[in-house]
Every structure is written in C-alpha cells, then in structure tokens.
Image (tube, rainbow, N blue to C red):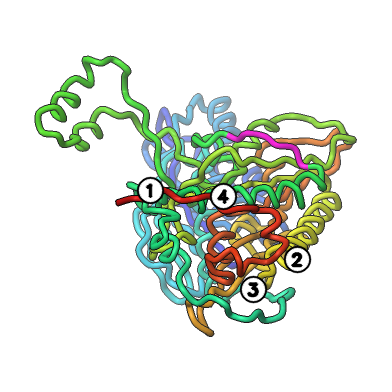
Amino acid sequence: MELEFRLKAAFKTSADPTTAREAIENFINNDAVALLSKGAPKGEEAKIENWEIGSDRIKFTITSGRYVRAHDAMIRLRRPLAAKLGKQFHIGIRGIEVDDFTISMESEKDLGSLKIPHVSSMEYTDGKLILHLDIGESEMENRVPDRILTLMEDKIREKSYGAKGEHWDLLWQSEKKEIIFDKDPTQEMMRLGWLKRGPSRGQWIHGPQSTKLFRTFEKIVLEELLEPLGYREMIFPKLIPWEVWKRSGHAKGVYPEIYYVCPPKTRDPEYWEEVADYYKVTHEVPTKLIKEKIGEPIGGLCYAQCPPFWMFMQGETIPTDEFPIKVFDRSGTSHRYESGGIHGMERVDEFHRIEIVWLGNKQQTIEAANELHERYMHIFNEILELEWRKAWVTPWFMAQEGLEGIAEEREAGTTDYEAPLPYRGEDGEWLEFQNVSINGNKYPSGFNVKSQSGEELWSGCSGVGLERWTSVFLAQKGLNPENWPEEFRKRIGEMPEGISFL
C-alpha cells in the first residue's frame, strides 16, 4: 500500500537560532541524513524537504513512507540537534510545535464520514485517503499517528474483505432428510406452554419441557464429547471489565453489541434516597435520575465466553507436559445486543452456552479441533440425526490482525455448522448452530501466556449454543417425542409435565 506522511513542524528554541544557521545546515546535510535513513530500505528514508529559521524556532517539512515515519523523524532529530545547539551556542530546544500533519494512503473505496480521534478532517481523491491530523508533541511521542494508521488500514482492509463476497467454503454435507415438521418451533413451544417471553429484550423463560431439552443436550455434550476428550470444567466470570477485552481484541469493535455495566457512584443510602422516594410516590423508576448517579461503564456482561479464562492464564509460564490444556465453562448466560429480528429462540440477547477452550502448541491445537469435529459429527449424525453441513470461513479478526496467511493455509480459522429450518422453505437461510475455531496465537500472545519449552502457543474455542441446538432439532424433528430419533429418546427419557394455567 502506497503511503506518505507529511509533517510541517518546528522546534521551539530558547533564543534566536539565526546565529547557528551554518551549524544547523551542516547538521541537516550530514547528521540528519544518517539519522533518517537508519532502519529504512534504500530509497525509503524520511526526507527533510525544506527548512527555515525563525526568531524563536527552526521549521521543518518532513516527508516519509512507512519505515522512518515523519513524526519519528522529528523526534529523532531533537536530541542530537539540541546537543549541538546547546554546546556551541547555548540555545535550548523547548519543545515541538506542529503546524500541519497529513497521512495519504491508498484505498479502493471512500470510507465515508468517520469520527477518528485526532483526525480533524478526511478526504478521498484519486484513489487515496488523505487524513489531516490534529496532534502535538505528546501525541507524536505516544505514537498516536501510528495507531491512527493501523486503524485506517484495518478499516480499508475490512471494506475490501467485505467486498470480496462471502468467505465460505463447503467442507461436508449430510444427505437430505425427510421433512416431518414444517412449523416454527418457537411459536409451537409458546403455544404448548414450553416457554414464554422474558421481561427483557431477546429473553425467554424456559418451562420444564424446554429446560429438559437443554439439560439433555448438555448431557450429550458431556458424555459424548467433553469427558471422552479429557476436558475439565471451570467457571468463568460473566462480568467482563475493559482490561480483558483490550487484551482479547474485542475492545476494537464490541461496542454496538454489549450490555454495559455501570456501578453506583456510592453505596450510601442517603445518596439514593431521592430515587427511592420518587418511585414510592410515582410508581415509576426514574431512569434519568439513576443515570446521573451511576459511574462510568466498567465493562459489560459476557459477550464472548472465553476471554475471562485467559486472565487465569495471564503472564504464566506453563510446564510443557501440561499441554494440551482442555477446559470448558457452562456456568451462566451470555448477552449480546442482537440487531434485526429476534422473534424466535434461535436469535436472542440472552443465551445459554457451553464454551470449550483448548491450548497447546500448533499441532496439538489443530489435533484438538479435529477431535471435536469427529465427536460433533457423531452427535449430529447418529444421535440427533440432523440434516446439516459444515463450511470453512475466515473470521474477520484474522484479516483485521494480519493473520490472513495462516487462514489461507486452513491452519487457523472457523468451521461453521449449519442446518436448514424447514419452516423457512426450500430456499430459506440455513442457521449456523455450532462452530469450531482455531485462533492461532491471538489469545496466548494477547495475555502473555508462555510454554516452558519456548514453543509458540495456539488456542481454539467452540461454543455449544443450547438455543441454537434446540431450534434446529425441533425445526427438523417437531415437538412430538415419538418422532424424535431413538438414540435421543434414550437420553432424554420421559418429558416432564408442564405448568397448567386457567
């Protein structure tokens, strides 16, 4: 990608630097050339396009490409130039003042109107994005321009990635099954009293029958998959602070989909008395008043179930013979603010999931994923007797974080399991109801987890969504247990009686 930084900035001086003109010129023509070429391929050095002296400053226009970037070049020049001016002329450099800073970068598409921190304006012309930065010395030292560049490259890559069409390759597909049920299972479950809508958005209250299905699916996963493969149960937290999501990478874009958690500013009952009094008088909860009395969000409810596990491993060096580490969590709900339709149980804001996580060297991680694929195939074919298929997809985070290479080689990535829902019709969308992901070194690296052997660690995860399993199973098999596969009936036993209402 063609890239250009252009910086107009000045070193502010403690005295008029005019007397040092000859020394400054000598520094620019010699010392500066060496400083600005260090670490850059030939022809890719940062360049001082022009310079001039003012009464209390030395102005520079610096251009560069990707290697020695213009802001880095300015900072590189400061100390040696200050040493020369101080020793010979008793002139000090008091700081850097930025007059203009732009980044020009190639982009096939205009990214539209974006609000990027420290970017005052953005324009698109002749296949290039031109960013006008509003930064000073502190931001340059803290590498803010580099992070702006990385963010924009991610956005360009995401736009390009999305434009390539669906990254989906069919790996396997079962034979077609006879359709024995064509109704919406959620509607039928409601009609029969198996479940009711919960009081919150995208939430369900499961009656005895629906709960029995969930527990049976859990039992199948435990007995047919987790126990034979040696997974150990853990309990992961369900309130996730920002520190976890920063390390896991979710902080890059999770914001539209999480339920935020804000603590009260104080536990003092007097501080909250007016809230309680308001409700006592009006029987309305004063949400605007509550908003004034709660603190900043400390994080959110569990969105992706595995990141908190990595805080257990963070900073640890693990004996080589401990690998592969295989664990799972089924201790609580996950929450995701879904967009679009949430009419049925298959797409909800609050859902129940068994999260399976494994960690080892590259070969161990891939082998663990293959073991899961074999066990899932056994469950879906021989116990649930589903019509389904699996497809290999490239998760967006791999494109975003520069992991396309291992993704293209099929060493890392996600396999989605999909099933048709007969009530949606012959050409209806298939529902993704299971996945297996190999995440490369993303999490071990992000949480600084090491092996005693020094080998690079990889990890994987697989989420068993009980709502999705139930939706697929009932959509294909119906709600009459007599039509369910024999192997499944053996495991579920007698269905419980529901709760009757007048």
Q: CA distance from mark 4 to mark 1?
A: 59 Å
- Report the span colored magenta: 231-236
Q: Residue at x 35, y 32 (%)?
A: 296
**Which residue bears the numbered disc 3?**
168
Q: Residue at x 52, y 27 (%)?
A: 89
User: 488 or 336: nearer the eye?
Assistant: 488
Amino acid at pointer 2? Glu
Amino acid at pointer 1? Asp
**Which residue bears the numbered disc 2?**
382
Element type at mark 3? strand
- Sequence-wise, the earlier of marks 3 and 1 is 1
Q: CA distance from mark 3 to mark 2?
A: 26 Å
Q: CA distance from mark 4 to mark 2?
A: 20 Å
How busy is the neighbourhood of tag 2: few (under 14 within 10 Å), some, or many (20 plus)?
A: some
Q: Nearer the viewer, mark 3 or mark 2?
A: 2
Magenta stretch encompasses residue 233 = yes
Residue 55 in the image: x percent, y percent?
A: 36, 38
Are the residues at dot 4 and dot 1 in contact (C-beta closer than 8 Å)? Answer: no
Q: Nearer the viewer, mark 4 or mark 1?
A: 4
Location of residue 232 by image quarter: top right
Residue 239 in the image: x percent, y percent?
A: 49, 35
- Sequence-wise, the earlier of marks 4 and 1 is 1
Q: Nearer the viewer, mark 3 or mark 1?
A: 3
Q: CA distance from mark 1 to mark 2?
A: 62 Å
Location of residue 395 by image quarter: bottom right
Element type at mark 4? helix
Q: Nearer the viewer, mark 4 or mark 2?
A: 4
How busy is the neighbourhood of tag 1: few (under 14 within 10 Å), some, or many (20 plus)?
A: some
Amino acid at pointer 3? Trp
**Which residue bears the numbered disc 4?**
212
